[in-house]
Amino acid sequence: MHQKITPLVDLYRFNDMLFAKAFDGIKDEDMAARPMEAGNSLHYIAGHVAGARYYLARLLGAGEEYPFGTLFNARQVTPRDPSEYPPISKIQEAWKHISEKLYARMEEMTEEELAVK
């Protein structure tokens, strides 16, 4: 791995740990709760940040389509019914899956690729 990207990879790996721990001990029904009417549920936030990781992987050439499509799109005007969301375990699986691809891609990035603006 190129030394320029090492600190970024360290941050992403730290986020892996945070993502995994964020949902420990939270019941599925509590994942759907919104802190206020205009706020997002933990379930939505998990799906949204997982989608962002898929987006980054695609930008770097290591991605694939997010398995949940636009379900967690940031441009939603009204929140969806929580029953439409996949189980949080499926979102966590998707996160792990794309993270492996993302890290493999980061590992092989060249000086020239890192220099592109």
Image (tube, rainbow, N blue to C red):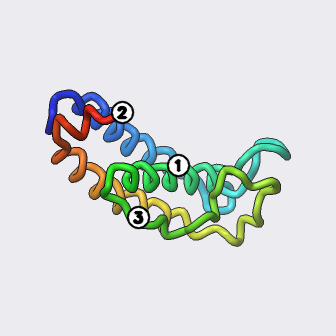
Residue 49's tag is: 1
Seen from this angle, which residue lies furthest right? 37
Badge count: 3
Residue 14's tag is: none
| Percent x, y of residue 12 | 35, 39
Q: Describe the element under mark 1 as helix, strand or loop.
A: helix
Residue 117's tag is: 2
Q: Is residue 107 left or right of residue 25?
A: left
Q: Say whether disc 3 or disc 1 marks the residue closer to the N-terminus.
A: 1
| Percent x, y of residue 50 | 49, 54
Q: Is residue 109 left or right of residue 25?
A: left
At a point 62% along the width and 56% down the height, the residue shown is 43
Place residue 31 in its image quadrant.
bottom right
Label 1 or label 2, whichever lies nearer to me, is 2
Place residue 10 in its image quadrant.
top left
Q: Are marks 3 and 1 in contact (CB under 8 Å)?
A: no
At a point 61% along the width and 49% down the height, the residue shown is 45
Check disc 2 and give the amino acid type.
Lys
Front residue of 41/24: it is: 41
Q: Is residue 62 left or right of residue 43?
A: left
| Percent x, y of residue 44 | 64, 54
At a point 24% along the width and 51% down the height, the residue shown is 105
Q: Describe the element under mark 3 as helix, strand or loop.
A: helix
At a point 80% along the width and 53% down the height, the residue shown is 77
Q: Quadrant of the C terminus?
A: top left
Q: Are marks 2 and 3 in contact (CB under 8 Å)?
A: no
Label 2 or label 3, whichever lies nearer to me, is 2
